[in-house]
Image: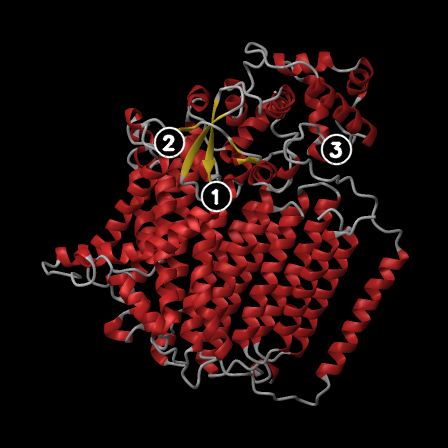
Amino acid sequence: MSFNWSLMVFFILAGISVGSALLVVANRNPVRSALFLVVNFFVLAIFFLTLSAQFIAAVQVIVYAGAIMVLFLFVIMLLNLGAPEALKERGGLQMPVAIALAVVFISSLGLAGSLTTGLPPTRATPATVDGSPYFTNRDILLPADLAQKLRNGADPATAYLRDQMHPEVQAKLAAYRDSDAPSVELISDMKRELNRLVDGPNLYDPQRFSSVRLSRETQKLLNSASPMTDRKRINRLLLQDVFPLEITKSDQMGSVETIGKAMFDAKQPWLLPFELTSILLLVGIVGSVVLARRRG
Amino acid sequence: MLGVPTEYFLVLSGILFTIGVIGVLIKRNPIVIFMCIELMLNAVNLTFIALGRHFVHVNGQMYVIFVMAVAAAEVAIGLGIIVALFRSKETINIDEVNLMKY
Amino acid sequence: MIIPNYRLGPIDLVTLLPYIAMLCIIGFILAIVPLLIWIERVVISLMQDRIGPNRVGPRGLLQTIADGIKLFFKEDIQPRAVDVRIYYLAPVLAMIPALTAGATLPFSTVRFRMEDGSVQTFPMVVGNVNIGILFILAMASLQVYGIILAGWSSNNKYSLLGGLRASAQVISYELAMSLAILSAVLMSGSLNLVHVVEAQMNGFWNWNLFAYPPLGFIITVIYLISMVAETNRAPFDLPEAESELIAGFHTEYSSMKFAMFFMGEYASMLVVSGVAVSLWFGGWTSPLPLLDFIPGFIWFLVKLFALFFVYVWLRASLPRLRYDALMNLGWKRMLPTALVILFLIACWNTLRTPQAQDANPVSEITMAPARAAEGER
C-alpha cells in the first residue's frame, strides 16, 4: 500500500486551520485575531480548491480575505481598538461554561456520527488524468437532463448519437420517465455508451454537427491535425459540445460555467434566492450608510 | 483530495464551528465576536462543499455563494452598528452596552 | 517565429512551458523595476524641464542600481514601540501578492513544429485556468494588507492615517475595477485571459477598447483610473502623501524593507497594466495582421510600457486629489457609470440576434439560460 499523500496534506492543512481558529479566539489583540482569521480563510480556500470548487475558492479569497477582513481591519483602526482587550472577567463563569458546552457539542456530534450508518459511498471517482478522453460517472452532471435530451433530441447530432447506442440502452432511455431520478444503472449505461462513442471512429461531420455550437478548443483541434490531436480527444470534445450543460470535463464541477448555468437555469431553484439575496445586499448597503451617517 | 474521506472534512468543520461558538461565548469585543461568527459560517461552507463533492452535485456550492453574500451584508451592517455604538458610548465592550436592560 | 523542435533532448518543452513562463514573469518583474524607475525619473524630468539623473552610468542609467545598493547597505532601523512580527510581515505581504498575480497573465505565444511537421501555438502562461481573472482579482485584493498592516504596526499616527486611507481607497476603487473587468469578461465571453486575448486577435479594431462603441472605451478609462488608484500612485497617492503624512504607511520603514514596498508597488503596477493590456488592448497580439511576424511578447512589452508611460504622465501632470474628492469620484461617479455600462453590455449581448451570436461568440455565462431553453425545445 502506498503512502497516502493527500491524507497527509489534509492533516497538515487541517492542523493549520484549527490552530489559526484557536488563535483567533485566544488572541487578546483584535488585529492579530483578524490576521489569523485571514490565515484560516486561506486554508479553507485551499480545501475548496481540492474539493473541485475553484470558483468558490477564488470568491472566498476575494470576498472574505479581500473585502470583509479589510473592512474589519479598517474599523479596528478607525476606532483605534488595536490595544489588547482589557481582561475584565465577570464572575469567571463564562469560560468554563463555554468549554463545557463545547465538549457537549463535540461529543454529541461524535454520538450522532456513531449512531448513523455513515454517508452513502461517494460517486466521485478520481479526476480524469488530464488528457484521458473517457467519461466517468462524475462527468455526467445532470443525468436527468442528459437522459431526456438523448431520448427527445431531434437535431442531427443527437439523433445520430442515439442511433449509435446499444439497442438495450435505447430501450432504457425510451422507458425513462421525466419525473424519476435516473437510476445509477442508467447513468452507468449512458457513460459506457458515451465512452464507446469516444472509442469509435471520428464522429465529426460538418452536416451532422451543423446545429451544434463548437467550442474554441474543438474547432482548434479539428483544424489542426497533429500527433497530439487524436481521434478520441476530438470525439470527447464533440460530445461535450453536443451536451454542454449535461456533461462536463471532470474538473469543471466547480467552474464558473457550471455554477452560472445552475444559477440561472430556470429548472433549478436558485433564481428566486438570487434575487432575494441581491435585495438583501441592497438593504445592507442602505442600512450601513444610514447607520454610519453622523447625526446632528 | 480524493484520498480523504468526506467524513474527515465534516469532523474538521465541526471542530471549527465549535471554536467559533466558544469565541462568541467568551469574547467581549463585538468585532472579535463577529469574526467568530464568520468562522462558524465558514465551517458550514466547508460542510456544504465537502458534501457537494461527495454527492457530485453542484448545489452544495450554490448554497455557499448565498452564505457568502449574506455574510457580506451582515458584516456591513454589523460594523456599521459597532461604529455607531462607539460614537455614542465611546466604548464597544459588550458588557457595557446594557441600555436595553433597564 | 517558429521553434523548430518541441523537444530538447529528452525534455518535452510543451509541458515545461508553465515553468518557463513562471521564471519569465518573476525574473522580468524583479529585473525591470530599476529600469522602470529610471524611465520614470527621466520622463518626469523632461516634462518638468529639468535634467534628471545623469551622473551614474550613461544617461544616469545606473542611478537606480546605485540607489538600490545604497538602500541595501543602510541601517535597518526598527523603532521601539512597533508590533515586531506584523512590522516585519507587512513588506513581505506588499510584495508577494503582486508577484503571484502574474501567474494567470498570458504574455506571449510560442509556436512549435511538431513531429509530423505541423505547427502548433501554445500560450505562455503559468496557469491556463478557467478562473484566471478571478485569481488576479483575489491577489490584487490582498495587496492592501501590506499597506494596512505596515500603517498599523508602525505605531505612528501618520502611518496609521496612511493605512486607513489606503484601506478605504482600495476597497472603494476595487468595486469599479471589478465591474470594469466584468464588462471585459462579458465582451469576450471568458474568465480565462488566454481566451479573452484570443477573442481580440487580428487587428486593433477587434480590441475590446473599440468593442461596443463607445462603451468599451468608457469602461477602459474607468479601469485605467481605478488601476492607478488601486496601486496608490499619483494622483491617488494619498496613503503616502509626503506633504501631509510625511510618507504615510512607510514612514517607519528603512533599508530593504522600504525597498520591498517600492518593489511591491512597481510589481503591482506591472500586473494591473498587464491585465489592462490583456483585457482591452489585445494582449500579445499585434495591432495589424501584417505585423504578425513580430513575436507576441514584444507587443505585450510595448503595450505594457505605453501604459507605464501613462502612469508617469499622470504623475507629472496632475496634483494629488483631496480625500473627499477621491471618495466622491470613486463612489458617486465611477461606480454608477461602471454599473450602467455593465448593464448595457449585458443587454447588448442578450438582444443580439442568434446569427450574430454565432459569428462573435459571447459569454457562456450570459448564454446559459438561452441555451437551456434551446435544449428544451
Dot 2 and dot 1 within a common chain: yes
CA distance for labels 3 and 1: 36 Å
The amino acid at mark 3 is Asn
The amino acid at mark 2 is Gln
Where residue C311 appears, x then y in whole percent? 26, 53
Q: Is residue A131 above or below residue C164?
A: above
Quadrant of the drawing holding the C terminus of chain C:
top right
Q: Chain of mark 1?
A: C
The amino acid at mark 1 is Ile
* Tag 3 residue: A137
* Tag 1 residue: C20
Where residue A56 appears, x then y in whole percent? 59, 49
* Tag 2 residue: C200
CA distance for labels 2 and 3: 37 Å
Q: Chain of mark 3?
A: A
CA distance for labels 2 and 1: 25 Å
At mark 1, the secondary structure is helix
At mark 3, the secondary structure is helix
Q: Is residue B22 above or below residue C97?
A: below
- Residue C264 in sight in this render: yes
Residue sitting at 80 percent across and 13 percent down?
A167
Residue located farthest toward the left when viewing the structure as drawn: C49
